[in-house]
Image (cartoon, grey):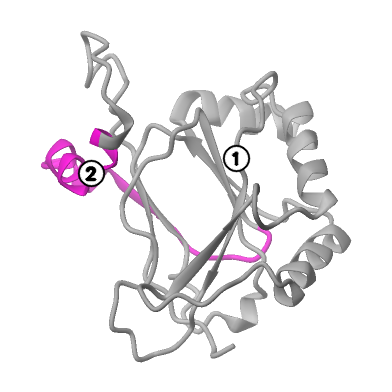
Amino acid sequence: TAVSAINAQFEQEQLVVVDNFLNPEILEELYQYCVESTIWHESEKSLFVGSYWDEGPSHPLMVSVAKEISRVFPFVRGLPLVHMWAYNFDSRKEKTHRSGINKHMDSAIVNINLWLTPDEANLDPKSGGLVVWLKNLFSEEHNPNNKVFPFHEVQDPHFGTAFLAGAEHLNVTISYKRNRVVIFNSAVWHATDEYNFKHG
C-alpha cells in the first residue's frame, strides 16, 4: 500500500515527499483560514512571519490532520504533537533580506511541512520549496560516541556550516507544490529555498 511504501522510504532515507496529501476540501479550508486569519503580524526584520500554536493557528482541522498522521504513519505513531506553526512569506520583489528561513534544525523527532498556496501563484515552479541536508548529526556514522549537543549550540549557523563542510553535495531541494508534504528526520538541517511568488 501507499502507507507502507511511505513508511519504508522514511525508515531508509529519513526523507519522504508525498503529493496530494490532503483531501481537497480540507486543503481549501485550511488555505482560506490562513488567508483570512488575523494571526499574522508584519515584521520589518524579515520577509516572513510565523504564527505558533500557543498564540496563533488553532483551526480544529489542523489538530485533526496531525492526529490522523499519527494514526496512519508508523514512524510518528505514539509521538506527541509538541508544536505546530504556520509561516506567511512576503512576495515583494524588492528583497533586502534573505527570502526565507535560514538553515537550521528543529527540536523534534519528525518534521512535517505542508504547502497550501495555489501553484498558480508560484512564478518559478522549480523553486519555492525546501532544501534539506541529509548529513545527520546524531547518526552513528557522524556521532559515534553519542555526544549530546545543547540545542542552542546546534542552532548556531556557524555550527551547522562547520558540520556540513564538505557535505554540501548531500543537500536535496524539494520544489514547491500545493498539497505536497515533506516529512523528514528533524536532526537534519533544512532551509527555505529561494522563492518567487505573485504579489499578494
Q: CA distance from mark 1 to mark 2?
A: 21 Å
User: Which residue is located at x 44 percent, y 88 percent?
Assistant: 92
Q: Residue furthest right?
A: 25
User: Which residue is located at x 21 percent, y 8 percent?
Assistant: 145
Residue 149 appears left or right of 112: left
x and y percentages locating residue 79 in the rendered image: 64, 22
Amino acid under disc 1: His
**Most foreground residue, 100 or 27:** 100
Instruction: Classify 78 as above or below 56.
Output: above
Tell me the element at label 2: loop
Judging by the rendered image, the residue that carries numbered circle 1 is: 83
Q: Which mark is residue 174?
A: none
**Most foreground residue, 46 or 163:** 46
- Residue 8 is covered by the magenta coloring: no
Amino acid under disc 2: Asp
Instruction: Classify 145 as above or below 169.
Output: above
Q: Which numbered disc flags the more N-terminal residue, 1 or 2?
A: 1
Q: Which quadrant of the rendered structure holds the N terminus?
A: top right
Q: Which quadrant of the rendered structure holds the C terminus?
A: bottom right
User: Which residue is located at x 65 percent, y 49 percent?
Assistant: 53
- Residue 156 is covered by the magenta coloring: yes
Residue 143 appears left or right of 41: left
Tell me which segment is drawn in magenta: 153-179
Q: Residues within 10 Å of mark 2 (few under 14, many from 20)?
A: few
Quadrant of the image occupied by residue 38? bottom right
Judging by the rendered image, the residue that carries numbered circle 2 is: 156
x and y percentages locating residue 153 in the rendered image: 23, 34
x and y percentages locating residue 15 in the rendered image: 48, 37
